[in-house]
Image: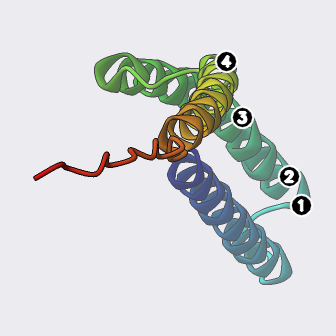
């Protein structure tokens, strides 16, 4: 989920960067052709970057809200909780293993054959 959000943000940054480059090239071309002054071109570019920065902050706020809502909906476990549960599982596995070993030892002791008693037959008298 986090990777998807990062990709989305990086895509937005990439698009903004490409747009800024194209805008700068277009303004430079207009200045070279003397259709606008250098001062006007600089003002257009500066305004664009100011608006872009403002929109970026708005976007980050919206993205943060959406992320929080998604996390609440899916009720993801926190990393701390998962680590705590992993510790408990390992402790329980250890206890089960010890109990299994103890049980196996008890079974081995119980299985030892008892010494057979010999019965001596008395001779029968006829």
- Spatial CA distance of label 4 from label 2 is 56 Å
User: Which of pointers 3 and 4 indicates the residue nearer the eye?
Assistant: 4
Question: Do the residues under discs 1 and 2 have CB atoms within 8 angstroms?
Answer: yes
Residue on which disc 3 sits: 53
User: Upstream in the sequence, badge 1 or badge 4?
Assistant: 1
Q: Residue at x 86, y 52 (%)?
A: 42
Q: Residue at x 70, y 24 (%)?
A: 87
Residue on which disc 2 sits: 42
Question: As rendered, which of 89 and 103 lies closer to the eye?
Answer: 103
- The answer to whether residue 5 is left or right of residue 73 is right
Q: Residue at x 46, y 19 (%)?
A: 68
Looking at the rendered structure, the secondary structure element under dot 3 is: helix
Instruction: Identify whether 31 is placed above or below 57.
Output: below
- What is the crowding at mark 3: few (fewer than 14 residues within 10 Å), some, or many (at least 20)? few
Residue on which disc 4 sits: 84
User: Upstream in the sequence, badge 2 or badge 3?
Assistant: 2
Checking the image for residue 51, the label placed there is none
């Amino acid at each position: 989920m986090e990777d998807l959000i990062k990709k989305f943000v990086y895509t937005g940054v990439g698009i903004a960067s490409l747009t800024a480059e194209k805008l700068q090239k277009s303004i430079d071309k207009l200045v070279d052709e003397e259709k606008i002054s250098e001062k006007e071109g600089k003002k257009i570019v500066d305004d664009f970057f100011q608006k872009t920065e403002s929109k970026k902050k708005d976007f980050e706020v919206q993205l943060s809200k959406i992320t929080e809502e998604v996390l609440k909906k899916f009720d993801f476990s926190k990393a701390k909780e998962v680590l705590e549960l992993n510790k408990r599982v390992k402790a329980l596995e250890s206890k089960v293993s010890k109990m299994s070993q103890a049980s196996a030892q008890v079974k081995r002791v119980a299985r030892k054959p008892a010494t057979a008693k010999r019965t001596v037959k008395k001779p029968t008298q006829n």
